[in-house]
Amino acid sequence: MVIIHYGSSSSSSSFSSHPWKYHVFLSFRGEDTRNNFTGHLCSALRQNGITTFMDDQLRRGEEISTALLQAIEQSRISIIVFSRNYASSKWCLDELVKILECKNSNQRLVRPVFYKVDPSDIRNHRGSFGKALANHECRFKDNPVKVQKWKDALSEAAHLLGWHLLDEHCSESSVIHEIVKEISEQVINSTFMDVAKYPVGIKPRVHKIHKLLGVEGRDVHMVGIWGVGGIGKTTIARAVYNSIAHKFDGSCFLEKVRENSMGAKGFVKLQKKLLCEILKGTNLKVANEARGITMIKEMLQYKSVLLVLDDVNDIDQLNNLAGDCSWFVKGSKIIITTRDRQLLTSHGVNLIYEVQKFDHHEALELFSWNAFKRNGPLDGFAELIERAIHYAQGLPLVFTTSTKVLPISYEGLDDTVKEIFLDIACFFKGECIDHVTQALEACRRKPAKDGINVLIDKALINTSMGRIWMHDLLEELGRDIVHKELPNDPGERSRLWFHEDVYHVLTANTGTTKVIGIKVELLKDSDVICLSETTFSSMRNLKLFIYRAGRYSGAIDSLPNSLRPMPEYPLQFLPSNLIQRELAVINMPRSHITVLGDGYKHLTSINLRDCQYLTKVSDLSGSPNLRRLDLDFCRSLVEVHSSVGFLNELEYLSLLDC
């Protein structure tokens, strides 16, 4: 069973894309180590490109400064240099409490340095630490809660893994070198990823995924992040990766798996990168895909890993990189981002997070940051902003970059599903899903439901209240694909929906065999389409004719044999040539037809609801397979042939309000 989780709609910009202003915050007692160990450590870190906060100001007053508290919050790592007089400083103890609060939010690393002090003295409040705490108890006897927080913080920090300089025989330079190397290689360079310039709405979505992953649990979890292109799957995956990578023995973020897996050695290169990043090696050799799978299973069996597979679109990618939870040791977590929900379920991924579109507040904030470099709009831009938000329809990509990623979703479809996507984009957005399915199947003589489900699974369309919908950008993409078939000659395009193109092709008789669908929806009642006997003669492959609004003059002798009549059919008769072909469905509610003739031997369904001009239903004995006949609200109907009562397959007959 697939569990679908919907993202929170609340907005938050506190989860920074580059969440850290500083890589390292140094907490130390100035009089003990400012001009020796801590000063040297700070210089070494900065020389190696590690942004380090070291308070250079003499501390005065009772309260720790707001700037220091902010620096702690904005630092990826805090290094606490415990020295003899550390606990005598109220400021140091307040820093320590704040540092551990940030650590416990699962987004910070804390490493202590025990500079010529015994960790057990800190844990048990002995020696200089016990004396300092006793002094604080006397000084703050009216605030015992504060002192207890300091005690608890000292005990907690002293249990953390860190570096030791217990006596004068320890080389300070060697320890500093070790610290810089570990911070550089294992923490900063290997795990942190840039997320987003303006991280609006990321935090609540990240928290949802944290819950699915069960980060603190020992189970191996595969979690899918699913959604349409441009909705922020990769951005969220990066933010999750940054927030928890330090909890694992090894981590790897494989970006653009779809793109990078192409080519003869695509999978091998990805397998090698996965192993090298997690094992911190560079000389690994992967001979082939099968060997790569074996190496992943064998070499990672003793390491808890965080693995992100970004932009996956094929089951072979998963089979070669994360074939099963059994490949990984307990506690490992695998995150997969994809536009294809079915891909996740077929791989046995039973935890799926569906990325929700931005709500209005989030969209407004992100637009404001990109347009005005502030978290709210400027005066006088309200109308512009509302248009932009309506256009974006919740996709953050629209505000931040081009929509070049959207065609990728289309190109990955097979030919049949591509055709269904284009039909929906050009003709069927907002239409009843049952009617659309019926129409598509009548056109192509093959089931359409599977293709529609593929589009739903790939987040290219969605259904609501029994109707098919798609994002405006995807509708625009589909229509643009059709328009580019021949921009300057609409009669040479596969589908016509734009009123000016439709009017031109039908009145000037310029349609060709390329045209397979037409939707008539003229904007002006004064626009009259003048039909001739040969209007449709050149459009021999026309399959869909949809009439919404418009006026006609003239007459036609025939329609193409490929055509399937559609709702609101504008003419009064079905041309005689329709009788000879294998018509299975007539779905023509609200059409202008006056008489339904006979001879449709393959018919299974007739829908002529609300046909105000229909007066007669002729002999239907030639349609022995007819199962459904809907004539509701045909108020001009005066005659129904008696043969209707002898149709053995008829299951549904309705003549309401006739």
Image: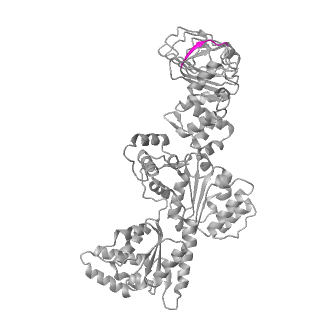
Q: Is residue 583 left or right of residue 216?
A: right
* Residue closer to the observer: 344 or 256: 256
The spot of residue 579 in percent (x, y) is 68, 15
Q: Residue at x 39, y 78 (%)?
A: 154
The spot of residue 418 in percent (x, y) is 65, 37
Q: Is residue 199 left or right of residue 557?
A: left
Q: Can the viewer see residue 67 in this picture?
A: yes
Q: Residue at x 42, y 47 (%)?
A: 364
The spot of residue 288 in percent (x, y) is 75, 61
Q: Is residue 542 left or right of residue 615?
A: right
Q: Can the viewer see residue 109 in this picture?
A: no
Q: Is residue 551 magenta?
A: yes
Outermost residue to the top: 638
Up the image or down, 494 lies above or below 205; here it is above
Q: Residue at x 75, y 55 (%)?
A: 264
Outermost residue to the left: 142
* Residue closer to the observer: 570 or 452: 570
> What residue range appears in magenta?
550-557
Q: Is residue 330 magenta?
A: no
